[in-house]
Image (cartoon, rainbow, N blue to C red):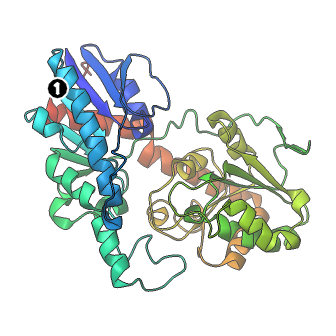
Amino acid sequence: MFKVLFLHKDFPGQFLHLARFLATLPGVQVDALASDPERALPGVTLHPYRVDIAADSRPHSYIYMADRAVWRGQAVLANCAVLAQGGYRPDLIIGHNGWGEILYLKDLWPDVPLVGYFEFYYHGTGADVGFDPPGAVNLGDLARVRSLNATGLLGLAAVDRGVSPTSWQRDLHPAEFRDKIALIHEGIDTGVASPGQVLPLVLPDGTRLAAGMPTVTYVARHLEPYRGFHILMRAAGDLLRGRPDVRLVIAGEDGVSYGPPPDGGGSWRAKLLAEVGDGLPLDRVHFLGRVGHSDFINLMRLSAAHLYLTYPFVLSWSMLEAMACGVTLVASDTAPVTEVVEQGVNGLLVPFHSPAAVAAGLMTALDMPAERRMRMRAAARQTIIDRYDLTRVALPAWTGMLHREFGLPLPPG
């Protein structure tokens, strides 16, 4: 029996498709460790763990994240040591590097191949830091950002193979480590994320939206600046005044995934509504909160124009799934978006920092001649099929690499 151990604090996370597939292979046993698992997968044995951080832990502010990673890595090591005492030894370990889970497993199992998922390497310039608002950062910022990479560098030194999902994200890592990092996206299920039947959407105020209506959509896990929520809200006035028939549908939770909360607390939604709300026809702005995946797919099928904005940062699955659904996409001209979206071919690119340009881009998308719109939508979907499709591209790349380099058994053919 070939044993694969996954490590992701929110399992399955980026390993959803890979872990689910490996669990179906004959002769393969799949286990996973997680502190805050999102869901169970058939055929995967889940081992929960907890992280206990000493109450008197007071790290330097530069290494706060590294300190937390050490505590987490220590917890994972202790739990794996218990498994080892019971006779468990994996043949392959696959883990996300970002939170420290993979840091110390080579000390327990030095001969077990370790594959790390490397999502982001921090830079003081050229990525998210200093991007919004644009400007120089000080020496203290540069030192703090450099220190954020302590966990990443320890992980890069430990793994036998790294994986990153986009070229830009991979190439953020130091040149001396890039040959160690394979470019493999986790994959988009284009059978699920696809054009198809559109169910009417009943909004919180009772309004019923259907296919063919001028609906502009925006989706993010949290409504925050890293995903351009502030730009959307500042663009909304021009869009809605310019197109009195348009409704703006916004999906996402209050809170933050990546950046800080607003000064003074509260949510970015409340802050932006206080800033621009008087200038908006709020009866045509609809906040859905968090939506389930099937509702997201339906929303993309219903959308007349979909907006995706991001700092130069980790690329969202939502943009790729929206393209797979055949949306008319308007997206920021930021990396790694520009690695996927070609201006005028499979989407429209707009400058992130210009709300006026964002509104104009959305109106261009809405007013596009039908033939051009259909061509662009088809090209968007074909891009995802050709480059990110789960069964044609991503899973074969993952399993092929694991088979060639680490002996993962695959069925004949």
Amino acid under label 1?
Asp
State the residue in front, 188 or 8: 8
Mark 1 Cα within 10 Å, few/some/many (few <14, many 20+)?
many
> Is residue 177 at all visible to an observer of this figure?
yes
Residue 74 position within the rendered picture, expressed as x and y whole percent measured from the top left:
24, 40
Q: Which residue is mark 1?
A: 91
Question: Which residue is drawn at the image coordinates 21% and 45% (left, top)?
Answer: 103
Residue sitting at the far left: 111
Residue sitting at the far front: 56
Quarter location, residue 397: top left
Q: Is residue 412 shown above or below 252?
A: above
Quarter location, residue 126: bottom left
Which quadrant would the C terminus be assigned to in this image?
Answer: top left
Residue 197 position within the rendered picture, expressed as x and y whole percent measured from the top left:
73, 34
Question: Which residue is drawn at the image coordinates 26% and 55% (left, top)?
Answer: 151
Question: Which residue is drawn at the image coordinates 26% and 18% (left, top)?
Answer: 28
Residue 366 position within the rendered picture, expressed as x and y whole percent measured from the top left:
77, 62
Q: Is residue 227 shown above or below 411?
A: below
Left or right: where 412 falls relative to 138: left
Count of numbered tags: 1
Q: Is residue 88 shown above or below 37?
A: above
Residue 44 position within the rendered picture, expressed as x and y whole percent measured from the top left:
37, 20
Which quadrant would the N terminus be assigned to in this image?
Answer: top left
Quarter location, residue 5: top left
Question: Which residue is drawn at the image coordinates 38% and 46% (left, top)?
Answer: 185
Find numbered disc 1 in the image and state the secondary structure of the residue it sits on.
loop
State the residue in front, 251 or 152: 152
> Is residue 409 at all visible to an observer of this figure?
no
Left or right: where 316 falls relative to 77: right
